[in-house]
Image (cartoon, helix red, strand yellow):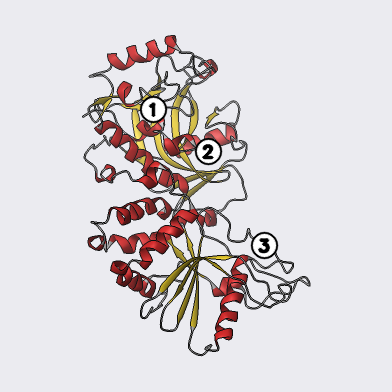
Amino acid sequence: MGKNGIVLNRMYVGEYIFKNLGHEIINMYAADNGKHYLYLNATGNYEKKHKGRIDTMLLTKSHKQNVVEVIGLATGLEDVPGANLPLERDKKKTNEAILDAQKKYINEQDGGITYGGVSILQIFNDAEQQSIFITYQAKNFYKPNGQVFIAFDSKYTNKDIPHGALLVKLSQLNWAKTSLKQYIYPESADKDYQTIRDLVNNSDLWKENKTKVNSNADIAKREISLIDICHLQNDENCFSDMLAYFMEQERYRGLWEEFFEKAKCYSNGCSLGIKLKGSYSVTREKEAKIDGVDSKKCPNGGRIDLFIRDQGKNIVVIENKIKSDINSISTDKNHSNQLRRYYNYVNWLIKKEGNGNEITPHFLIMAPNYNIPDVEEERDKNQELLVPQMSDIYKIITYKELYDFLSTKKKEFENDANFVAFYGSMRRHTYSNVNAYLYYEMEKKFIRRIKEFL
């Protein structure tokens, strides 16, 4: 058996990295000495049977189930002492033999192994179960020229990945559900091995990368806020509260009026064109209860996240969806979802007030770019399509659309620490998938961690 193995290293996964600095962040940087060192998820070690057998690593992140995106390629791998030893399962116990071997290796490298002038031993010295700091040293490190995806399921096509990206399909290997590393050898999966080897050997796909840490990068300049400390970035109610609060602030009314008029819909790119007039009001958790109406005949009820009404001709309904499914709340016998109940309520309200010719309702869904909702079609008990369909009524506005708009208006809120924190926490919802954000977040933590020692 020769040194010809390939390992797929899946990164930016798990609850750990939401609150901690993931060790794999070093994989995307050259150390200060110009050499490239790698950490193999999840704990940095590997079984003895793989010792001396791995020469190539593909660094990947999850794209969707059974599909990963390749974000880096490392070749010419050399094992680092200690990484092939088993770790103690009891976190209270130390792995002295491993730790001693790692420290000796790190200190013997040219100038030690440092990033941004700080030793890797300092950067990760207080992490949970930190005995292994490095798994491999790589002779070469590359990033893809474009986007490259690997699918473990033949059902996927180019329609499942971004336009212009390369899709490589495997036919023998299954997705590793319980491990963040997956080994590929020619004797165990010959066809898939050759497919991956052809990908690795295609020089047109790769460009050498020796990026080092820039501890002065803007990425680490944003101040940590209470939103970060309390980990509220994914809390729908918290974001709805913040949206309502800042929309009602007198100093920002002009800002929001411009946004609702100029913001573009995700589906068709057309502007919303909502022209709020006069002093509008914002209501949180507006009860959508239709008085005196049989709910079996007219599904109603629930609470609208944001209900905006101006002194002119507009009612704006906003359903804020960060993590939950837009189709998940279905409580009436006609199987109508919450969107239809809000639609019914607003139309009943307009009719009740007797000014249907004067008021125009607008129905919006606010969603992160990694969780764009697909509004399902609705049918009655006889399987007849309900009219109108909510997919034709509701327009989708992404957090990226709002974030990009606010990016052009920073002077209007740069002295408001609360608004700045709200704006900054929104960034995670602008990425097309969660893993892309996690890389950004980890990179920010990495640089901040380095700056603590400078």
- The residue lying furthest to the right in this view is 382
Residue 443 seen in render = yes
Give SS at disc 2.
helix
Q: Position of residue 14 (x, y in %)?
A: 50, 37
Query: Is 150 located above or below residue 20 in the figure?
Result: below
Task: Inspect the image, locate mark 1, and give the three-letter code of the amino acid beneath it.
Answer: Leu
Q: CA distance from mark 3 to mark 2?
A: 45 Å
User: Which residue, given by chain and number where applicable, does mark 1 sit on?
Assistant: 38
Query: Is 436 located above or below residue 59 in the figure?
Result: below
Q: CA distance from mark 1 to mark 3?
A: 48 Å
Give SS at disc 3.
loop
- Asked whether, in this view, residue 175 is left or right of residue 100, the answer is right
Sooner in the amino-acid sequence: mark 1 or mark 2: 1
Query: Is 402 located above or below residue 187 in the figure?
Result: below
Residues 1 and 149: in front is 149
User: Which residue, given by chain and number where applicable, does mark 3 sit on?
Assistant: 330
The image quarter containing residue 324 is bottom right
Q: CA distance from mark 1 to mark 2?
A: 23 Å
